[in-house]
Image: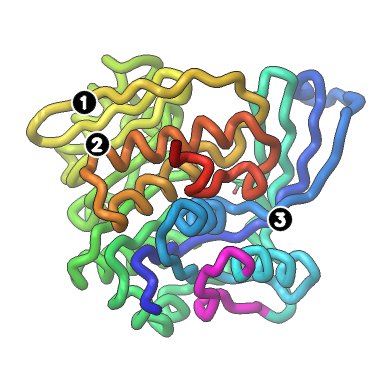
Amino acid sequence: MNAKVVVVGSLNMDLVVRAQRLPRAGETLPGERFFTVPGGKGANQAVAAARLGASVAMIGNVGDDDYGRQLHQALSAEGIDCQGVSTCPGVSSGVALITVDAASQNCIVVIPGGNGLLTPQSVQHFEALLQAAQVVICQLEVPVETVAWTLKRAHDLGKQVILNPAPATGPLPAQWFAFIDYLTPNESEAEALTGIAVTDQASAQLAAERLLQAGAGKVIVTLGAQGALLVTPEGHQHYPAPVVQPLDTTAAGDTFIGGFAAGLVRGLEEGEAIAFGQRAAALSVTRAGAQPSIPYLAELVP
Ligand code: RIB
């Protein structure tokens, strides 16, 4: 079966510590719990799209180690086409060191490992997957030249292109914008891309309009509990977030993006797909960990 959603991006093993609060510089804190779970923004988005009803293929790299085998297995178990997931000899798999505090806030340090070796050529090798797709999703946890190549190729093939600009360290290359149908930053990413501090709907709109002026097709700023703001050349629309008691927000954004993409390929209208992604993300924040927290379609259907 041809996959409708193709994710080009990262796979990480998440090493998660829960503590009452995040440590300050130089401080040692007692933690409360430790666990390892499959994560990585790319893999999380692929899992979300698959669990939420899309046929999905992933293109990415793991290292030749136990984590790599577990990450590969985690995607296969979801029915994701993993022919594009390659094992890189002599390198570790990507890992993310994540601390989550009692208020469900997290901080993450990522070591790219095999993700850092994903080249444009390695994506091109699996171009048949891109050709068969309806939606292609990228993030920024693999080399920029690979993201650049994929965005352009997917656009030239006439696919719907979603860029989740995470993690964001500064403005995007100007030539990327013309290839992006949906740019989906959160508050801090929108600020990194534009220099505008995003704290509410008004500032999110300002930042999104800046990104539209740069050439992005449409912008969806995710604002956590404040919902999501869709900004297009025609206007803007706010989507309130479902009210939940958060336990762990890790992968909430990834769940939203995977759910949004799954909604699009399942034929939902744009606004319905946003609301669908939000419902999935809201459920994910009530659960611990990245991929274990992502809901299945049956959990969202009343
Ligand atoms: O978006 C959450 C993800 O970011 C985690 O799973 C971690 O691997 C990092 O990539």
Q: Amino acid at mark 2?
A: Gly
Tell me the crowding category of disc 1: few under 14, some 14 to 19, or many 20 or more residues within 10 angstroms, Cα based.
few
Q: Secondary structure at mark 3?
A: strand
Q: Secondary structure at mark 2?
A: helix
Specify start and end residues of the magenta stretch as a single range.
77-88
Which of the 4 image quarters holds residue 241? top left
Q: Amino acid at mark 1?
A: Gln
Which of the 4 image quarters holds residue 56? bottom left
- Give the residue drawn at x 73%, y 72%: 69
- Give the residue drawn at x 55%, y 58%: 43
Q: Secondary structure at mark 1?
A: strand
Instruction: Check mark 2 vs ligand 1: CB closer than 8 Å? yes or no.
Output: no
Horizontal and vertical percent for residue 299? 53, 42
Horizontal and vertical percent for residue 231? 20, 31
Find the distance from the CA under tag 1 to the CA under tag 3. 36 Å
| Residue 299 located left or right of residue 266 | right
Find the distance from the CA under tag 2 to the CA under tag 1. 9 Å
Task: Judge whether 292 appears above or below 236 on screen.
Answer: below
Tell me the crowding category of disc 3: few under 14, some 14 to 19, or many 20 or more residues within 10 angstroms, Cα based.
many
Q: Nearer the viewer, mark 3 or mark 2?
A: 2
Q: Are marks 1 and 3 in contact (CB under 8 Å)?
A: no
The circle drawn on residue 271 is: 2
Q: Amino acid at mark 3?
A: Met
